[in-house]
Amino acid sequence: MTKSNIALSNLRAVVIVIVVAFHASLAYVASAPSPTAFGEAPYGWQAFPIVDAHRWLGFDLFCAWQDVSLMALMFFLSGLFAAGSLQRKGARTYVADRLWRIGLPFALAALFLSPLAFYPAYAARTADPTFIGFWRQWLTLPFWPAGPQWFLWQLLALNIFAAGLYVLAPSYIGKFRRLAAWAGTRPIKFFALLAAVSAAVYVPLAMAFSPWHWGAVGPFSLQLSRPPVYLTYFFAGFALGSYGTERGLLAFDGPLARNWWAWLAAAVLSFAFWAGFTSLTMPHWYQASALARLGGSLSYPVACAAGGLSLLAACLRWSGRRVPALDSLSANAYSIYLLHYPFVVWLQYVLLGSSLPAGGKLAIVLAGALAASWTLSAGFGRMTVGAPLPAAKRALFPVR
């Protein structure tokens, strides 16, 4: 593996730890809404299954930072190897592989893991937390909550879209490759282009629907303002990956990595602007002034691009060496993503009555959920193939 590929593998490991930490923190954020009945709209338990009495404002800042940039970065990383895989396999085999590796896990996770994960949300909100009562409530919901697995169905849709484009116009990959070559020597212009395209597709939707509104049909849920942003980042990663993960912006000694500190400063500054404008729109988006809503909408694409690129730049600069723990985390990251959420919510539920401070509870939930899902993933890999699966086949983002 080249240093760039090692850094990207380590980034997968870092991202999955952040994902688990994000979900583990949600029970302890100061801004968590007061629990409402399980069967009543707006069903706030989907985002906050457990709301603990012990909270800390610092977790709000951490979760807000990740909400701004983490999901877009995940779609970006998901696109990195898509072009090469699509060209090697052809559209039909590529789509069949995506259906097997993304579609089937999404269906199984939504069908079995989601009810398991959300039962504590019901138990914490009712005086009679029986499984039969939960199941009756679950079946009367106007949708089928999938939890964090919403990422998978949207990723699958983007992969199918990329394959459809390849059938209609195979030369589009070459055009993306030229875009990536251009970006390799112009990182600031690439950042500006990424932010501008994101703003063009995000701001109208955010102003119309608010940045927070979700919709769902069955298990297919989406945040109404963000799917076009995720499409933008997926194809940004697609373009850079088509050019090669060892050169251009992704080179371990390239312009992005060399200036990681500048990207971090830009991320902090742009996040501060977004947080300032967004705070003026809380708690009721539509009652805020148009200027505050426009400022929050315009600052999000900038903070999103800067936050994602800063983490990518830091990993390219500082994580070009193999570390056994990171190798294992990276190899098992996709399974950890699928399995961690029930462990997170159940541990939060068990700790509800504890007098530990919010930081102590978070530490237990994060360590317990990460260890349990990591161990289960590694053990399952050994049982199925006799040894841990290669990192390329167990990546967090199943794109190879």
Image: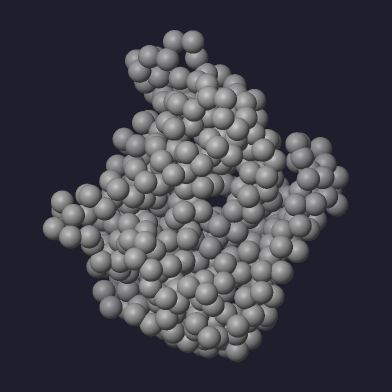
Observer able to see residue 287: yes
Report the quarter where the C terminus lies. bottom left
Instruction: Determine whether 372 is above or below 120 in the image.
Output: below
238 to the left or right of 359: left
**Residue at 34%, 43% in the rendered image:** 372
Residue 16 vs residue 400, the one in the foreground: 16
Instruction: Determine whether 145 is above or below 16 in the image.
Output: above
Instruction: Determine whether 355 is above or below 127 in the image.
Output: below
Residue 140 lies in what quarter of the image?
top left
41 to the left or right of 298: left
Counting from the top left corner in percent of width and height, residue 163 is at 37, 69
Residue 317 lies in what quarter of the image?
bottom right
Observer able to see residue 44: no
Residue 342 vs residue 358, the one in the foreground: 358
**Residue at 16%, 53% in the rendered image:** 384
**Residue at 52%, 71% in the rendered image:** 315
Counting from the top left corner in percent of width and height, residue 12 is at 43, 63
Residue 112 vs residue 333, the one in the foreground: 333
Residue 377 vs residue 115, the one in the foreground: 377
Count of numbered circles on the image: 0
Counting from the top left corner in percent of width and height, residue 339 is at 35, 44
Residue 301 lies in what quarter of the image?
bottom right
Which residue, as the protein is rendered here, is positioned at the far left? 386
**Residue at 47%, 39% in the rendered image:** 365
Report the quarter where the N terminus lies. bottom left
Counting from the top left corner in percent of width and height, residue 388 is at 22, 60
321 to the left or right of 36: left
